[in-house]
Image (tube, rainbow, N blue to C red):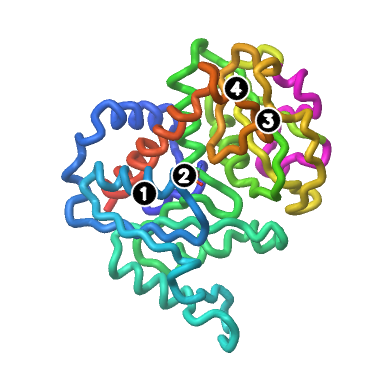
Amino acid sequence: MKYYTSINDIDNIKTWIEEAKALKENPLNYSELGKDKTIGLLFFNSSLRTRLSTQKAALNLGMNPIVMNVSGDAWGLEFEDGTVMNGNTAEHIKEAAAVVSQYCDVIAVRAFPTLTDKAKDESEQVMKAFMEHASVPIVNMESATGHPLQGLTDALTISEHAKKTKPKVVLSWAPHIKALPHAVANSFTQAMQKMDVEFVIANPEGYNLSPEITGDTPIYHNQEEAFKDADFVYTKNWSSYEDYGKVVNTDPNWMITKDKIGDAKFMHCLPVRRNVVVEDAVLDSDSSIVIEQANNRTYAAQLVLKKILESK
Ligand code: CP
């Protein structure tokens, strides 16, 4: 495997989940696989979980991780072809990606969307530029439209906690004070579409995700109706896709409460704003599996890196 940039790069999610579970049981079983290999983690945006869990995953495989906050510490990067670079950008991605490829055996990139330019975001300009101009494998640590390491983690977590053959999983929008990307919701949707689950989405009018992503998945605009008989409630805010990047509704009635979810397990990719997205009573209860979910980030990343190392 040379690239892990989308949930679509998973050929068989059942097998991947079983492999991730095996890595979780024995995380150091492949500690020689990445010996003398370096992974460069390039962050254009903030992170806690992705940064630490991907480093941890690399270390478990014997790799040497090096990390850079690109936006703060590197030269301003130019991604357009043929630009007269007399503005704020000092280095072209063509040189940058080629140079980093000489230092690293794998490059992982986090680059969020603009949320103002839909076409640019959907073109995945940054991720595609690294794929084109780097000579080593590329891993997506959350791009403009997807967060496939998170989606794989979420599938693993649901598989571990499922008490029935075909659990009901609801992805619910919840309010937030800022305009947030669609990446987590997109990758979660794609992951659930590959799983043997009853999957539905709940969001207010004006918040439907891209129809390219949701496909045939049922969408409810009534949260209570969607939550009926749910085994898992996965919550995330995202900005409007139709009115691209806008916050068109902050209705607090969509906040997740204990009363609403009943016995369902609560999931969120984190970070989460307490008592805006979800009330304390949920996060502080046994219903919440967000900490175990975050722990699984390591094993999802480790599986992806293992597959890349084994293909090299
Ligand atoms: N869920 C997630 O990607 O967390 P970070 O933004 O902290 O990496």
- Within 10 Å of disc 1 (Cα), the crowding (few <14, some 14-19, many 20+) is some
Q: Alpha carbon of mark 1 to alpha carbon of mark 4: how far?
A: 39 Å
Q: Alpha carbon of mark 3 to alpha carbon of mark 1: how far?
A: 32 Å
| Residue pointed to by mark 1 | 1
Image marks 1 and 2: residues in contact by CB distance under 8 Å: yes
Q: Earlier in the sequence, mark 4 or mark 2?
A: 2
For badge 1, the amino acid type reads: Met
For badge 2, the amino acid type reads: Asp
Q: Earlier in the sequence, mark 3 or mark 1?
A: 1
Helix, strand or loop at label 4? It is helix
Disc assigned to residue 9: 2
Q: Position of residue 52 (x, y in %)?
A: 37, 46
Judged left or right of residue 283, residue 103 is left
Magenta segment boundaries in residue numbering? 205-227
Judged left or right of residue 190, residue 238 is right
**Tag nearer the camera, 4 or 2:** 4
